[in-house]
Amino acid sequence: MTQHATAASVGTVRPCELMDLQTVADTRGKLSIVEGMKDVGFEVKRLFYLYDLPVPAIRGDHAHRNLEQFVIALHGSFDVTVDDTVSTAVYHLDSPRQGLYIGPMVWNSLVNFSEGAIALVLASEHYDEADYYRVYEEFTADAKRSA
């Protein structure tokens, strides 16, 4: 739940942001809520989760032209590095009560997974390979052109 390092705001379309989730707790346990548009600012069209991750794994390691994401550590912890070619920040996610918004045109990498970590990602669009930047140099060239 702590933010390791933050540079200037990262994300020129919409800045990356740690967001606390509405959580209800009672003697039966806790329930955290994420509603599309209301809590994350976009309609959720797809969700996926990462699990059985080797501790040294690197996931993500790409950017999207238009897609918005909201990343939650459901179990364990991991770091998310975000980079818009101007600023970079590292966020440490370790609580299902908080998530990280990542907007379009932000290179992101998920690293430093704890044993048993589970990452949930909510996405604003269905999968579309044409929306991905998988080569960092192509991403930086386009990001500089649109700046």
Image (cartoon, grey):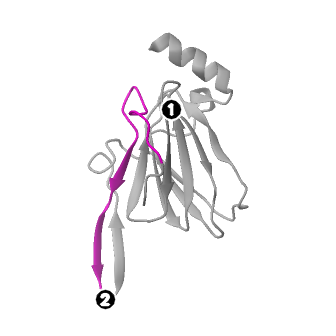
Examine the rendered structure and indicate whether residue 29 appears above or below residue 119: below
Question: Left or right: 31 with respect to 72?
Answer: left
Q: Quadrant of the C terminus?
A: top left
Label 1: how many Cα within 10 Å (few below 14, some 14–19, many 20+): many
Q: CA distance from mark 2 to mark 1?
A: 40 Å
Q: Secondary structure at mark 2?
A: loop
Mark 2 residue type: Thr
Label 2: how many Cα within 10 Å (few below 14, some 14–19, many 20+): few
| Residue 114, position as x, y percentages in the image | 63, 65
| Residue 79, position as x, y percentages in the image | 56, 53
Residue in the image at 48% along x and 58% along y: 93
Q: Quadrant of the N terminus?
A: bottom left
Which numbered marker is on residue 56?
none
Image quadrant in which you'd find residue 28: bottom left
Q: Does residue 6 belong to the magenta stretch? A: yes
Number of the front mark, 2 or 1: 1
Q: Which residue is mark 2?
A: 27
Mark 1 residue type: Val
Examine the rendered structure and indicate whether residue 113 appears above or below residue 90: below
Residue in the image at 32% along x and 60% along y: 21
Image quadrant in which you'd find residue 129: top right
In the current view of this chain or complex, which residue is farthest to the top? Answer: 145
* Region rendered in magenta: 5-26
Q: Are marks 2 and 1 in contact (CB under 8 Å)?
A: no
Q: Compare marks 2 and 1 and give the one earlier in the sequence.
A: 2
Question: Left or right: 124 with respect to 56?
Answer: left
Front one among 43 and 15 = 15
Q: Does residue 94 belong to the magenta stretch? A: no
Which numbered marker is on residue 106?
1
